[in-house]
Image (cartoon, rainbow, N blue to C red):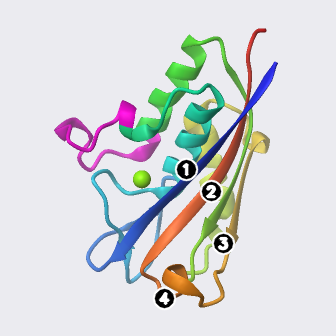
Amino acid sequence: MTRSGLGFDLHPLVEGRPLVLGGVTVESDLGLSGHSDADVLSHAVGEALLGALALGDLGRHFPDTDSRYRGISSLALLRHVVTLVVARGGAIVNVDATVLAEAPRLAPHLAEMAKRLADALGVDADRVSVKAKSPEGLGLLGRREGIAAMAVASVEVGA
Ligand code: MG
């Protein structure tokens, strides 16, 4: 049986923080604020994987009240999510994600993000897709108040 999960995340953009997306630090005047490295893309992927197996959300597994997760690389969180999936007999089929960001331009970095996510997930690079979309200046994303990411994951599990 193949199960699907949906992930979404949104973090505020602030000065004085690095911008980390899919484990890649992208040059930017603003970075994402959050308890961990605030990597919205990795978080959306993690939420999608948890969702596929109805395991709740990232906050349930990695509470932001736990100092162990302060500043942690979200790829490390993803690797932990994979252990939860595998422990339930799951095998990741594919992940597709979209980052919604007004700036900077992400196109040159998408392949590297997909590769790092695939490495963290333990799957071939061609099973992970990362796309970027401009909000065309509209709303909170267009005003660069934050960056959002969405992801879908498919997981094969025994019947
Ligand atoms: Mg998050």
Is residue 22 covered in magenta? no
Quadrant assignment, res 62: top left
Please, is residue 114 above or below residue 20 in the view? above
Please, is residue 35 above or below residue 122 in the view? below
Give the labeled residue for mark 2: 150
Checking the image for residue 108, the label placed there is 3
Mark-to-mark CA distance, 2 and 4: 19 Å
Evaluate whether residue 103 shows in this view: no
Front residue (pair 159, 76): 159
Q: Position of residue 117 (x, y in %)?
A: 59, 45
| Residue type beneath disc 1 | Ala
| Residue type beneath disc 3 | Pro
Give the labeled residue for mark 1: 44
Mark-to-mark CA distance, 3 and 2: 19 Å
| Residue type beneath disc 2 | Met
SS for tag 2?
strand
Of mark 2 and mark 4, the one earlier in the sequence is: 4
The segment highlighted magenta reads 60-75
Of mark 1 and mark 4, the one earlier in the sequence is: 1
SS for tag 4?
loop
Quadrant assignment, res 4: top right
Q: Position of residue 127 (x, y in %)?
A: 77, 40
Mark-to-mark CA distance, 3 and 1: 20 Å
Q: Is mark 1 within 8 Å of ligand 1?
A: yes
Of mark 3 and mark 2, the one earlier in the sequence is: 3
Image check: 103 left or right of 94?
left
Evaluate whether residue 55 shows in this view: yes
Mark 1 vs 4: CB contact within 8 A: no
Q: Position of residue 11 (x, y in %)?
A: 41, 65
Checking the image for residue 139, the label placed there is none
Give the labeled residue for mark 4: 143
Q: Quadrant of the N terminus?
A: top right
